[in-house]
Amino acid sequence: MSAAAATAAASYSLVRQPAMETGLLEVSMGPHHPSTHGVFRMDVRLDGETVVALKPVFGYLHRNHEKLAEGMSYLASMPFTDRLDYFNSMTNNWAYALAAEQLLPIEVPERAQYLRVIMAELTRLVNHTSLVGFFLNDLGALGTPLLYAFRERERILDLFEQASGARMMCNYFRFGGLRCDVPEGWLARARAVVDAFPRFLDEFEKLLCENEIVLARTQRVGVLSGAQAVNAGITGPMLRASGVNYDLRKVDRYGIYERFAFRVPLGSAGDCYDRFMIRLLEMRESLKILDAALRDIPTGPVMGNAPRVFKPAASETYGRVESPKGELGFYLIADGTTKPYRYRVRPPSFINLTVLEDLCVGHTIADAVVILGSVDIVLGEVDR
Amino acid sequence: MTEQINVVAQEVPGFTRAELEQAGVLLSSVEGLYNWARGGSVWPLTFGLACCAIEMIASATSRFDIARFGSEVFRPSPRQADLMIVSGTVTKKMAPQVVRIYNQMPEPKWVIAMGACAISGGPFKQGYNVLKGIDRYLPVDVYLPGCPPRPEAVLQALNYLQEKILNIRIEQDPAFTAGRRQYPVPRFTGTDLEPPYNPEVWRPPANPNTEPARPKKAATA
């Protein structure tokens, strides 16, 4: 137990002395609350300002994604995966394409593999910059860091738009490749964005990482131990912030990730500060991958020999990628028709949210907001 | 507003409004001035539902800068907001909350239905848990299509709303005459909403199947 949690627990027992018996206050935070990142509700029980119990309430954005997918052809679900985690449409596409390509093996051409990596890492940059902006917003730095983050996000979204035609909902991947090649000059423009990005990161880190308020509000807050994280099935940056070295890009080596040299940053304390820093460090590693991918990308086709009608034989499969929020997996059961019999999404931010109560109990209600911000949830994915 | 000012301007014989403006004379009715001021400072509610909320936030950031149109003050509390941007999918579980938040807003208040989901249910319309358009429960002023709409489109919707505000006749508009408009909050039964729509603001479109049948043709000639 960390020092802060121990102090909080000590003061808690003090308040619970029989002579000073006080009532617990029940607060329903959300579904309309600016700090819950969408329509998420936390039923919090408070003793003074200290969180005693916390119950997450889901389902305010349940859009029956899985049920809809069972009624349509495999490819028709692709645009719906964009809307799962609406920051990361490219990695969602990839996870789904990966699962489908296991059902019916299709060779993905070399250029498409490179473009997939480039798009996925650009998506990681978008997600992590936005997350840091929103996280600082939750800490009370209203506006400024978020404006910086969105300024950079727009530059990357421009690239997405030029490649796929849409800013957010790209719908760019297909089974066996990509929908279309990137336009002429795109790689040079991507190179310019990637080259300019470290300057922004330097500025961002200078602004935030040693800020006294950020340190005071995030260090030793919401400590998640490595063992607890593994037991709860936590994945992604949140797991690595607790010091567990597990990155699907290294473990599965899906796509062509084995060709790139990059490191997996690890945290040591597992607190909110580590979870915040790990995102900044991961962006540096993504830039390395992007740098190499943009240098080595070959020319050629971007679409393999996919059949006109995607009709796999009866089988089941699980495809997963390291999405910016964690392990995003698609579990598909094929029954020999053109529609999946069962379509299941393993959403990283939903599973990462399961430890929220353990992280928040003993901290103040203001810290619960910070902890939720550091978990990095997107309700489209949590509720589906 | 243009119309009203022209009415006033006609009272100055021999001058058009443009000529007066060039001479440094601005003429307006109180109503015109009031609407102009109100249209230039519409405060939206910080209220994100789904994907569209991100584009709504993007419209407030540096590149698009909704502050140019006077609407940068996003208010988390409905008590201080003029405009509700229903940004994203309204599920059946969320719909009662949306109506309740609308009821808490003071008059005058406006609603923009942002994105295909808020307009009609959008891509998720076939699902069992998605409301097929927020206009079933709330009066919508501007429909903003797209999935999601671009931030420029959000700004255009705001411009349309401002145009609408400029043309308000205060003594006739429900925002000023009907007191605070409050609509019945639907009840979520666990499977559906009760009632399915508010007949005050929405009526189901005419169903060709229930219209009186046309006279039948004679059997095969």
Image: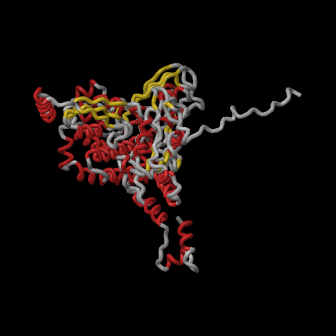
Residue B192 is at least partly visible in this image: yes
Q: Position of residue B62 (x, y in %)?
A: 38, 56
Q: Position of residue A167 (x, y in %)?
A: 46, 47
- Counting the numbered discs, the total is 0
The quadrant in which residue A369 appears is top left
Q: Identify the image quadrant of the C terminus of chain B.
A: top right
> Does residue B200 lie above or below B58 as drawn?
above
Residue shown at 28% from the left, 47% from the top: A136
Residue shown at 42% from the left, 56% from the top: B42
Residue A243 is at least partly visible in this image: no
Q: Position of residue A315 (x, y in %)?
A: 50, 20
> Does residue A310 lie above or below A297 as drawn?
above
Foreground pick, B188 / A270: B188
Foreground pick, A182 / A238: A238
Residue lying at the far right in this picture: please name it: B221
**Is B147 on the left or on the right of A150, as rendered?**
right
Q: Position of residue B151 (x, y in %)?
A: 46, 52
> Does residue A78 lie above or below B175 as drawn?
above
Residue shown at 22% from the left, 48% from the top: A209
Foreground pick, B23 / B65: B23
**Is A262 on the left or on the right of A270, as rendered?**
right
Colour logic: secondary structure
**Is B71 on the left or on the right of A364, as rendered?**
right
